[in-house]
Image (cartoon, helix red, strand yellow):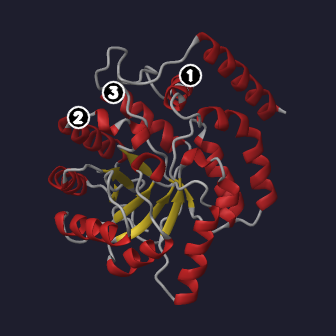
Amino acid sequence: MSALRLDETARGVFPISATPFTSGGALDLDSLDQLVDFYLARRVHGLTLLGIMGEAPKLTPAESRAVVRRALARVRGRVPVVVGVSNPNLMVLAALANDAMAAGAAGVMVAPPVGIAGDDALLAYMTAVVAAVDPGTPLVYQDYPQATGVTLTVEAFHRMVDAFEQLVMLKHEDCPGLTKLARIRAEAARAGRRRVSVLVGNNAIYYPQELARGADGAMTGFAYLEMLVEVYERFVAGDTEGAEDVFDVYLPLLRYEAQPGVGLAVRKELLFRRGALASPAVRAPGPTLTPEDRRELDRLVGRLERRLKA
C-alpha cells in the first residue's frame, strides 16, 4: 500500500479524526496539529478526515478544505489519509474530492445520499460519482444505513467491485453486519472476485468478531485508539485470545462512547482529557454532557486506568 494512494491492500487502523473547535465554535487548526500528532504517536496505519463523527456536515466548504490541507501538511505522507467527501450535490462532492487528492490525500470516502432505493439506483449513483471525480481516484464506500437509510446488499456490493476498479475499500457499518461481512468474503472468494479492503466502524463494538469474519481493521474514532491498534496487531499475529483479552479491558468505556446521540461529546471529552484536543467543544447543534455523564466517565476512566496498571 502506497502512502500516497489507497489500494485494496489497505490494512490496520484508520481513525476517524475529530474536528477541533474552540469553546466558541470556531475551527481550531492549531489543535488539529496536536490531534494529528496524537494519532500518529499511537502507530495508526492511516487517518480519515471529515467523517460523520468528524462533524463534516457542520463545516463550510472553505473549512473542509482548510482541515484537509492542514492535516495533510502535518501528516507529511507518513500514513495514507482518506477524506470524507459525501454530499448530496455531486458538484460539491467532486470539487472537495479533487481538491483533497491534489493536496495529497490517498483516497476519498463516499456515502450515498438519503433517498436511494434499490440496487440499480445505487449502482447508478456510484457510476455518477466515478464520472464526477478525477480519473483513478481511489474510492471508499461507506455502508452506514443507520444514518443514510440506504441499504447495500451483498449483491450490489459485488456489482460495484466488478464495475469500478477505483473502489478499493468498504467501510462496513451495517448493524447487525457480521453475516453480511462473512458473505461478502465467502462469495467473493468462490467467484474469484477482486478482494477489496474492509474496515469496520460503529466504534468497533464488534471488533474481534469482525476481524474473525474477514475485516482488515477499523475506521472509527474511539478515543483510546491504541487498543484498536493492539487488537489488530495481536489478531494478525495469530494471538486471537490475546486480542480478545485486550478488547475486553476497554469494552466498558468503548461501549459508553458508542452511545447514539451523546457519543460524540463523550469522545471529544476523552480526547480533551488525554491532551489530544485543546477543547472538547462540539459545534452546535450537538450533544453536551451532563454532570452525571461526567461522573460516570470519571468512574469508567479510573476503572480502565486501574485495570491497565494491573
Q: Which residue is mark 3?
A: 30
Q: Is residue 97 left or right of residue 244?
A: left
71 and 57: which one is in front?
57
Give the distance between the C-alpha atoms of the residues marked 2 and 1, in whole angstroms: 25 Å
Nearer to the camera, 117 or 260? 117
Residue positioned 53% across, 81% down in the render? 188
Q: Is residue 303 left or right of residue 138?
A: right
Q: Quadrant of the C terminus?
A: top right
As drawn, 11 above or below 306: below
- Residue shown at 45%/77% (left/top)? 158
How crowded pointer 2 is (Cα within 10 Å; few <14, some 14-19, many 20+) is rated as some
Kindly identify the amino acid type of the residue bearing the numbered disc 2: Glu
Ranked by sequence position, the earlier of labels 3 and 2 is 3
Secondary structure at badge 3 equals: helix
| Extreme-right residue of the structure | 310
Q: Residues within 10 Å of mark 3 (few under 14, many from 20)?
A: few
- Horizontally, is 225 left or right of 75 in the view? right
Q: Residue at x 74, y 30 (%)?
A: 304
Q: Give the image location of residue 235, x and y in percent.
A: 70, 61
What amino acid type is highlighted by mark number 1? Arg
Q: Quadrant of residue 222?
A: top right
**Looking at the rendering, in which quadrant would you find the N terminus?**
bottom left
Sooner in the amino-acid sequence: mark 2 or mark 1: 2
Q: Which residue is mark 1?
A: 273
Is residue 205 placed above or below 223 in the rendered structure?
Answer: below
Q: Position of residue 307 (x, y in %)?
A: 80, 32
Question: Marks 2 and 3: in contact by CB < 8 Å?
Answer: no
Query: Which of the two discs, 3 and 1, labels the residue nearer the N terminus?
Result: 3
Q: Nearer the viewer, mark 3 or mark 2?
A: 2
Residue 67, x across and y down, in percent = 29, 38
Toward which corner of the image does residue 179 lie, by quadrant?
bottom right
State the residue at coordinates (46%, 82%): 194
